[in-house]
Image: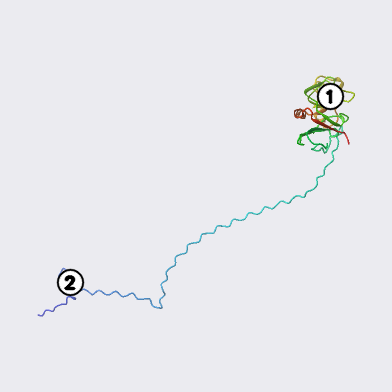
Amino acid sequence: MFAFAVPAALAGSPDRQGTLTSTKPTEKAKPVSKATKDSAPTTTAKPTAKPKPTAKPTPTAKPTPTSKPTPTSTAKTVLEPVPATESSYAENIPAYPPDGRQGRRIVYSKALMHVWLVNSDDEVVRHYPVTGRWDRPAKGTYNVYSMSSDTMNEHSRVTFQWMVRFAWGTNDTSASIGFHSIPIYYKDNPERGAKKGDRMTGTSELGLPVASGGCVRQSDEDAAFLYRWAEIGDLVVVLPTAD
């Protein structure tokens, strides 16, 4: 028999049984076809836009407060003072004494039964109702000449405190006249129907011209204040009962 030579390129490698195994040639990879004109180009996805930060809300403007209307100025009506009577108090008493003076002084109005204490800056430091008489002391100017914390009147059987003397009695009496507290009987006075411990007049009568003597009676508080405030030599102005 004739033996044919097998080309090496076609010869397979023997397997473990000696059998030839044929090997197919490796196929060439087909080239990737280029995109045709009609093929849609591949679109690259655009990156997603970053979300814009949310704008801060504009604060609501506060409403402008409505201006209050300017009150229409009206001239105040000054009421004339009404004098006191034995049964009625004075009315429309001014806060400043109607004496037309300036400076430190004590002003006593017999018509209004009222006293004003004015300091050196022309300021009223205190004013209050009193009990006195229409006929004394006489209108005019005086000066404080004596002061006593405790005083008594043996004729009337009374004692009183915080005496500030500024005048003298009329021809029927030489007793001093001043500002003091309401007198209190230190013993019975049958002539006046008073008993020991009674007040000569009540506090409700302050502001009325019902005093029996010539002095000016004050509440305990006002009398003590004047006594501490007053000085020897202070001017005292007594205004008339009526102009």
Q: Image point 81% across, 31% down: which residue? A: 235
Secondary element at tag 2: strand
Quarter of the image with the N terminus in it? bottom left
Quarter of the image with the C terminus in it? top right
* Render colour scheme: rainbow
Q: Pointer 1 and pointer 2: residues touching (CB < 8 Å)? A: no
Q: Which mark is residue 176?
A: 1
| Residue 20 location (% of width, % of height) | 17, 73
- Tell me the CA gap for discs 1 and 2: 164 Å
Q: Is residue 11 left or right of residue 233?
A: left
Front tag of 1 and 2: 1
Residue type for callout 2: Ser
Residue type for callout 1: Ser
Residue 169 sits in quarter: top right
Instruction: For label 2, count other residues whose C-alpha is less than 10 Å away and answer few (under 14), some (14-19) or many (20+).
Output: few
Q: Nearer the viewer, residue 182 or 122?
A: 122
Secondary element at tag 1: strand
Residue behind mark 2? 13
In the image, is residue 213 above or below residue 16?
A: above
Q: Image point 79% across, 22% down: which residue? A: 151
**Which residue is farthest left?**
1
| Residue 127 location (% of width, % of height) | 78, 34
Of the numbered discs 1 and 2, the one sitting upstream in the chain is 2
